[in-house]
């Protein structure tokens, strides 16, 4: 995992404003569809919604599954789609990404920013690599735990938001929970030892999720977000697609360590998937 740090001033005096975009599943060909949804078009609709909402965005976080077909062009399409948002975009890989290619394609192109430790006045955001090559499930390696520990020791006064692709808790979807973070219990136990860790954020589950983990010493907010393309039905034992539209998550990280967050979705029914599918 790359390890580099960047400092940003915040645009608002009151909070750090973060926009999460996740699971874009783009193709090299702009006509590419995932289960009947043109993923390039659905991302562009989400980006248009972000622009319309005029957030004072300090940084964008792309939490994996940027590509669906592992092509360099799919990453270039991502850059092109988000480049009008006027904010740096940091990223973590998902199980549909090829990490080396992703870094090569994204790292050198503004507004993409490859640092995985983002420092603000009162907060730092740590981006982890939770992937296992060629497997849908995830795992946090010791090197990532060491990165977390080092970052917190560097800035013990700052609150911490950890972002990655995989879910460290099961989300009541049996088929999907097979592919969670395999050492999710260990991950929660270890990060909850740090009083600085206030939030965990991920993608992968293609649905909205907002719960609190009651850690040994303090509660930790756990957030996951809609994909910018297809949505999975919450609390379903079998693969099932939801008719909800694509969206993104806004996070406002407050100076006192609290997190205000809301999900925004595209209006209408333009990006409804095929009904008769059994997997993806
Ligand atoms: Fe995904």
Image: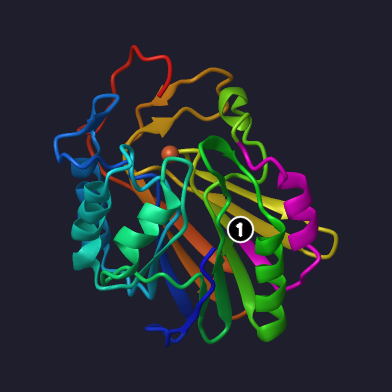
Depicted 262 relative to depicted 121: above or below: above
- Mark 1 secondary-structure assignment: strand
Going 59% across and 67% down the picture, which residue do you hit? Answer: 161
Q: Is residue 174 left or right of residue 64?
A: right
Q: Nearer the viewer, residue 54 or 133?
A: 133
Image quarter where ligand 1 lies: top left
Give the x, y percent position of residue 205: 50, 38
Magenta stretch holds residue 165:
no
Question: Residue at 21% across / 48% down in the picture?
Answer: 45
Residue 250 on image: x %, y %: 42, 60
Residue at label 1?
A: 200
Which part of the image, by quadrant, shows the C terminus? top left
Horizontal side of residue 20 vs 51, given as left or right: right
Tell me, yes or no, if residue 128 can be seen here.
yes
Nearer to us in this view, 126 or 256: 126
Segment tinted magenta in the rendering: 180-200
Task: Identify the residue at horizontal 65%, vertical 77% (top origin).
Answer: 151
Q: Residues within 10 Å of mark 1 (few under 14, many from 20)?
A: many
Residue pictured at 54% horizontal, 72% vertical:
3
> Does 123 appear above or below 235?
below
């Amino acid at each position: 995992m790359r390890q580099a740090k960047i400092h940003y001033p915040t645009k608002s005096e009151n909070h750090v404003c973060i926009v999460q975009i996740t699971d874009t599943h783009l193709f090299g060909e702009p006509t590419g569809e995932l289960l009947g949804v043109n993923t390039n078009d659905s991302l562009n609709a989400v980006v248009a919604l972000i622009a319309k909402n005029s957030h004072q965005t300090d940084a964008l976080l792309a939490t994996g599954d940027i590509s669906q077909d592992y092509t360099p062009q799919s990453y270039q399409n991502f850059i092109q789609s988000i480049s009008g948002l006027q904010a740096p975009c940091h990223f973590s890989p998902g199980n549909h990404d090829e990490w080396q290619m992703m870094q090569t394609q994204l790292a050198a192109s503004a507004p993409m920013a490859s640092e995985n430790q983002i420092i603000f006045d009162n907060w730092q955001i740590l981006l982890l690599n939770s992937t296992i090559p060629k497997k849908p499930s995830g795992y946090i390696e010791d090197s990532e735990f060491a990165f977390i520990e080092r970052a917190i020791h560097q800035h013990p006064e700052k609150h911490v938001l950890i972002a990655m692709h995989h879910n460290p808790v099961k989300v009541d979807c049996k088929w999907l929970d097979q592919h969670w973070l395999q050492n999710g219990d260990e991950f929660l136990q270890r990060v909850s030892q740090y009083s600085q860790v206030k939030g965990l954020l991920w993608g992968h589950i293609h649905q909205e999720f907002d719960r609190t983990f009651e850690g040994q010493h303090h509660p930790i907010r756990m957030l996951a977000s809609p994909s910018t393309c297809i949505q999975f039905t919450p609390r379903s034992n079998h693969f099932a697609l939801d008719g909800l539209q694509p969206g993104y998550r806004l996070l406002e990280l407050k100076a006192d360590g609290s997190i205000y967050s809301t999900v925004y979705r595209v209006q209408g029914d333009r990006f409804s998937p095929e009904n008769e599918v059994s997997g993806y």
